[in-house]
Amino acid sequence: MQDTTLAGATFRDTVFTEALDSTFVVAISSNGQYWAAGGRCGEVRVWREAGQRLHLLWRAHTDMVLTLAFSPDEGRLASGSWDGTITLWDLERGAPLWSVWQPTSVLGVAFAPDGRTVASSGNDALVRLWDSKTGTLLETLPHPAPVLAVAWSPDG
């Protein structure tokens, strides 16, 4: 709650259990079991039990986390940052599976419906497709302007 003023505020039955940085992005897994938030200083937090219990906290990136996406099977989380990195996280072990860099800020990440591919986007007017198992770049697709977000249709 940096730069927040509590002047005139009334708190009743409130407990702050941790300090939070400015939140830039939030994602919720498809069944609502996991919630994630990415912050200004590169942190990613993951809560489980529908956002009730902090599960994981990572110093994931060196700059703002701008995008998050849960895999369809809810076992992984992709994070993208202003620093140009994309990291794929294992939610059970709490460990990174791989991290890759693109030469521009990562503005969007999304999993294919089958979970085998991750798409990323940025200011360089390209969409990149990555193998979600290895982090290998599969394809680069040009676009006429910066791509602010990516998504897959349910049909792939």
Image (cartoon, rainbow, N blue to C red):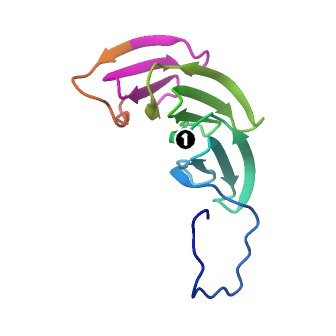
User: Judging from the image, what secondary structure is the residue with disc 1 in?
Assistant: loop
Q: Which residues are magenta?
A: 111-139
Give the percent coordinates (x, y) of residue 17.
76, 66
- Residue 51 in the figure: left or right of residue 136: right
- In the rendered image, the quadrant that contains the C terminus is top left
- Residue 155 in the figure: left or right of residue 26: left
Residue at image position (40%, 12%) is: 139
- Residue 82 in the figure: left or right of residue 150: right
Residue at image position (58%, 83%) is: 7
Residue 126 among those drawn in magenta: yes
Q: Which residue is mark 1?
A: 64
In this view, 66 is above or below 87: below
Amino acid type shown at disc 1: Met
> In front here: 117 or 4?
4
Residue at image position (65%, 59%) is: 51
Give the percent coordinates (x, y) of residue 119.
44, 26
Give the percent coordinates (x, y) of residue 80.
53, 33
> In front here: 23 or 6?
6
Give the percent coordinates (x, y) of residue 48.
69, 54
In this view, 3 is above or below 78: below
In this view, 115 is above or below 51: above
Which image quadrant for residue 120?
A: top left
- In the rendered image, the quadrant that contains the N terminus is bottom right
Q: Residues within 10 Å of mark 1 (few under 14, many from 20)?
A: many
Residue 37 among those drawn in magenta: no
Counting the numbered discs, the total is 1
